[in-house]
Amino acid sequence: MLLELQGLSVTRRNRPVLSDINLTLDRHELVGLIGANGAGKSTLMETALGLLPVTAGHSNLAGMSAADRARKAAYLPQSREIAWPVSVEDLIALGRIPWPGSGRAAVDRAAIDAAIARMHLEPFRKRTAMRLSGGEQSRVLIARALAQETPLMLADEPIAGLDPAQQLACMRLFRELACEGHGLLVSIHDLGLAARFCTRLVLLAEGRIIADGAPQDVLGDELMQRAFQIRTQRIETEHGPLILPL
Ligand SMILES: Nc1ncnc2c1ncn2[C@@H]1O[C@H](COP(=O)(O)OP(=O)(O)OP(=O)(O)O)[C@@H](O)[C@H]1O
């Protein structure tokens, strides 16, 4: 199992924000983490990685050294802040830091080039990352996570701020990565894209998992009403389902 969370609970400012989270994720899975704003999606990822202390429970990643964990799991945080004026290529190369050692230069170069190609960033390679548009910066940070070449990726709203074509390309790439044997946990607000690309959905409401299963089951009327207080309409198309919030 790439990710194993057992009985995870987190309290922030004396308020429970995650309660008794049990979640596993294996290779070949693209798991969509869905839920209303404030449901606990980012907290779940940060806690799983050991970046936030738990009140109770266990994550298989949290006890590892930072270096070991960085070779197991790449993380795309929700904040897309780029703090230094480095080139796109150099920023993506930071994804290689967990893999030190001499004689690896060629391996590093291949990983960086592959990440640039997968995110279609060739034209931006020499540009200063801070001076790209918001969506372009997001793609660079996804590429940095790809260059890390980890079995597991946790990505917090990776397609937020991307244009429709880039959203599709990104979800397609994640699905491809899952097919290749990676495992991915991706928080996402677009229920249609979640239904179309994710192999499984986990629905959070007020810090609890209220559903975990096949997308068509998790996106049922009753659960959508409970999690988002909305009705949805599902429209089947030749490209997959569309989920229309009403
Ligand atoms: N630094 C913090 N201190 C205290 N409470 C926090 C902090 N960050 C988040 N919270 C609270 O924890 C809860 C879960 O927040 P979290 O960011 O995990 O939600 P989310 O599901 O990722 O939301 P969104 O869809 O808006 O990104 C919210 O009620 C939020 O107000």
Image (tube, rainbow, N blue to C red):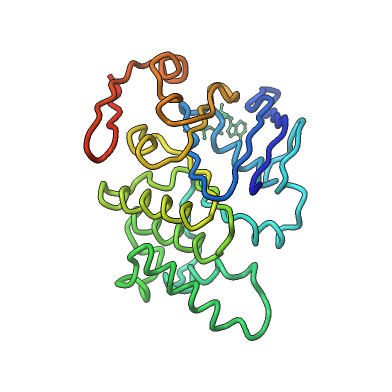
Please tell me in which quarter of the rendered image ligand 1 is found.
Answer: top right
Judged from this view, the residue extending furthest toward the bottom is: 103
- Tell me: residue 197, above or below residue 137: above
Kindly identify the residue that appears in the image at 50 percent across and 72 percent down: 111
Q: Look at the image and tell me in which quarter the C terminus lies.
A: top left
Give the residue displayed 38% in from the left and 64% down from the top: 118
- Image height of 122 relative to 161, above or below: below
Find residue 227 and report its horizontal and vertical position in percent. Answer: 46, 19
Residue 152 locus on image (x, y percent):
58, 53
Residue 122 placement: quadrant: bottom left
Does 130 appear above or below 201?
below
Q: Position of residue 99 (x, y in %)?
A: 64, 71
Q: Is residue 116 left or right of residue 237?
A: right
> Residue at (43%, 31%) from the top-left corner?
215
The residue under the point 58% across, 60% down is 150
> Where is residue 56 shown, x and y percent of the image?
77, 30
Q: Nearer the viewer, residue 216 or 82?
A: 216
In this rendering, position of residue 120 left or right of residue 30: left
Residue 62 relative to residue 31: left or right: right
Of residues 40 and 117, the one nearer the viewer is 117
The mark tally for this picture is: 0
Front residue (pair 168, 207): 168
Report which quarter residue 71 is drawn in: bottom right
